[in-house]
Amino acid sequence: MNVTDSDELATATPAAAAATPVTLAAKVRPGREALYFARRNRKLVLGLGVVLVFLAVAAAGPLVNPHGPNEYVGPPSQRPSAAFWFGTTMFGQDVFAQFAHGLRATFLVGLLGGGLAALVGMLVGFTAGWRGGTVDEVLNMLTNVVLVIPTLAVLLVIATYLRVRGVVPEAIFIGLFSWPWVARAIRAQTFSLRTRDFVDLARLSGAGATRIVFREIAPNMSSYLFMTFILLFGTSVLTAATLDFIGLGPTDGMSLGLMMNNAVLWSALPLGMWWWFVPPGLGITLIVGSLYIMNVGLDEVFNPRLREL
Amino acid sequence: MLRLEGVTKRYRVGTFGSRELVAVRDVSLEVRPGEVVALIGQSGSGKSTIGRMVLRLTSVSGGTISFDGTDVAGLKGARLRAYYGHVQGVFQDPFSSYNPVFKADRTLELVRETYFPRLGERPWRDKVEASLAAVRLDPGQVLGKYPHQLSGGQLQRLLVARALLLDIRLLVADEIISMLDASTRIDVLNLLGDLKARGLGILFITHDLSLGNYLSDTAVILHRGEVVETGPAEQVFARPVHPYTRSLLASVPQLHHKWERTGHGSWEPAGEGA
Amino acid sequence: MSLRVDNLKVWYRTLRGEVRALDGVSFTIADGELVGLAGESGCGKSTLGKSLIRLDGRMRHVDGSVELDGKELPIGDSERMNGFRFKEVSIIPQYAMSAMNPTRKIGLLVAELLASRGERPAAVRDELLRRLALVGLEPEVLDRYPIELSGGMKQRMVMVISTLLNPSLLIADEVTSALDVSTQKAVAETLVELRDRNVVKSTIFITHDLSLVYQIADSIIVMYAGRLAERAPTDALVGSPRHPYTRMLLAALPEVGVRFADQRLEGIAGSPPSLLNPPAGCRFRDRCPLAVARCAEQPPFVEVAPDHYVACWKAS
């Protein structure tokens, strides 16, 4: 028994008069309480706000702005103006159109790559944590191998060999290399939750392993899984931008990293064409940064001990 | 009904599993229908391990556990589920036995999913209410609530109700009242007494001798994984034979009966790693 | 030494309001007295123990005073209480077994504690060794890490540490809860030893186990829902309890020799009131078989027999 709060706090509701500890946070329903704190957490609200703004631009931008990302629509190297909100590139392409389309690719990569990594990580983590023994050893080995592989280097090599590259394959590759730390953490949590009484009781109710893992153990980690996904989203975006920037991104379409690549290739900096590389660079920084800040905020929301009373 | 013969449990401990820890050594006992067997031991005696082995939550290293003549160690799948239809358990910590993110009665739903999948809504409600009535819980007070909204006593009773849904013949009660207050303990204990009168066999695991004595027909005293004394409860408590049992009974605080002061140098408790 | 607690009120701040854990408690403890503070979970006994040494930052000292040896204890001020902790008032906290830093050798722990109190470890060393012998620990234990000791040994070590500076008042908060029956007896008897050898003057022994407190205490205080229910010398309380709660509690304890088939014991139906918004009047009213209209008014804690105090209209 680990009593850190005194029993007086435990009996603050009429019926909870047992000799076991009940933390303050568990007095109200967990979901509603999380929402209450979520709305009041500045980091979370701010971070989410920024991301949503960019999402809106990605969704609505191409609809508002009729130009395609690679169309030659106007005089080259124009500063931002009423006609071209972000100016034009050296070839007369609309920077804002590129930006909006690039955002779409960014979000897609984040979703796909992050989602895939989360899925693989959960699968490996839950299986290793639940089964233990040899299965755990093997999966651990696999996790460690993938963990120490230098992701970027391998992606570079793969990308170099492929002639034609799309956004989806890029996202898949990123996803396949980002999952190890997720698997580790989930495995550890599963190990500890596996020994709890309610899991034993579920076994006594005749539930099978899959049912127990996904319907008893996973819901207890839902906040962690959510935060993990957000982090993976962010890292996928960053990795994709890096790949794109060095020219190994998708060969079709537009992305923020590609915009920056072009800007550098065509000497935008020495020529003072800040409107070409500042928007994409800022965009990536703000999106990834906001995701990380959201994560910190979420941690405070879900973890009662980090909150201020 | 339930029979343990020479049951042993070994764990590998230490770096690389170099050492062996024998948690339970050659334990034999029996629970007959309608009988309450009190398995009494202090911490480290292996009593909980025995309970878990009977419930198939831990594997058996040696010996056999049989229920109605069938060895339970090999049961799998449908036959294991059938076994759980006859044998259930309730554990020590009422709050840990419920998944904190769900409502308390979900634990009843889990039983329904496996054992009564095709039962209609109305018959299921009737069944639940009958079980709750048997443990003297008011359905309006406990259904639809989260675990932290109920008291420890109510939660433990709900767990007994869950076991009763299955028409069980043996209940493994592992320290089920240790975490309850004195005023609620006795109610849950009385409940077990009533169930025993209806023919339920109970393996009552506890460290508290007075509790063991209140309810049980047979007492089994466990020390460091071995059975040191066993017999009809009244005899074991009134005329203990083994020195360990004697020292245990001498250390139990009782109302209206003060300890004999051994004075300075009383730090020789019988064999416990104190 | 003498302890005087006068109308002590200590509440906890929580998200949902203030929990009135201790709501007007008054009593005195004489020199050399070992008082048992008994009650069920949520009654306020732990809060009372901790408030006398102010170890919990969430407590809010609302009203009342505590006087130790004629001096007022600054229980509302954690900084000023620092001068009293371990020297005048000391506590063996609940789950003391986890109270020792696992990464430190025990000897180092003790030396650091003494240094923080302004004592030179070398000067106290002989006494420390004597105390270790008193509780049956070898001097070698000072060179060990906490993880190498068993539960009972850790408990005894914490008892030695807490009483090293000879505090006037020792508060033992549920020190026997997690122990085996035999170790429990040894620890309880050590508390008596510490008092008998004048290491500590008086002791407050907090527990939920009435039969245990019956063994070693001189007098027993029973608490319910933040208030005192009854206080009497041990034999008087157990032999002739006056408060309905005490009576029912004693009747709910199974003992070796009492069997279900012969004598069915009864528990107390219901549960204690919420301390967020406690009802007016006697807090046991809802569960009390003797409750009458008058119980809507809080009964005073009065003396009904020599040294025997009860808070019940029916008993006085």
Image (cartoon, rainbow, N blue to C red):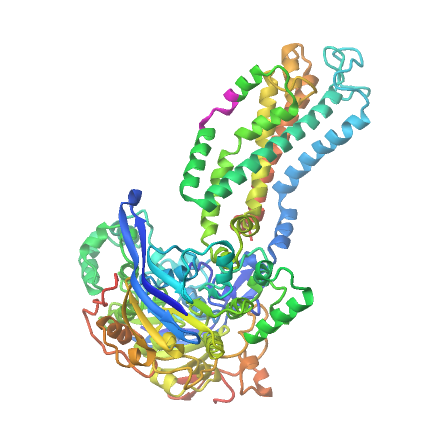
Up/down of B261 relative to A77, above or below: below
Q: State left or right for residue C300 relative to residue B15.
A: right
Up/down of B147 relative to A83, above or below: below
Query: In this picture, which residue range is highlighted in magenta?
Result: A148-154
Q: State left or right for residue B42 relative to residue C74.
A: left
Q: Nearer the viewer, residue B164 or C185?
A: B164
Residue pictured at 30% horizontal, 45% vertical: B17
Residue C127: x percent and y percent? Answer: 19, 60
Q: Is residue C94 visible?
A: no
Residue B95: x percent and y percent? Answer: 50, 62
Residue C149 part of the magenta segment: no
Q: State left or right for residue B198 relative to residue B229.
A: right
Q: Nearer the viewer, residue A268 or B139?
A: B139
Numbered marks: total? 0
Residue A66: x percent and y percent? Answer: 82, 22
Q: Main secondary structure of the magenta part?
A: helix
Q: Is residue B260 visible?
A: yes
> Residue C237 lies in what quarter of the image?
bottom left
Residue A24: x percent and y percent? Answer: 54, 58
Q: Nearer the viewer, residue B45 or C272?
A: B45
Residue pictured at 62% horizontal, 72% vertical: B129
Q: Nearer the viewer, residue A136 or A303?
A: A136
Up/down of C12 relative to B187, above or below: above
Residue pictured at 63% horizontal, 11% vertical: A265
Q: State left or right for residue C71 relative to residue B14.
A: right
Quarter occupied by the N terminus of chain A:
bottom left
Residue A151 part of the magenta segment: yes
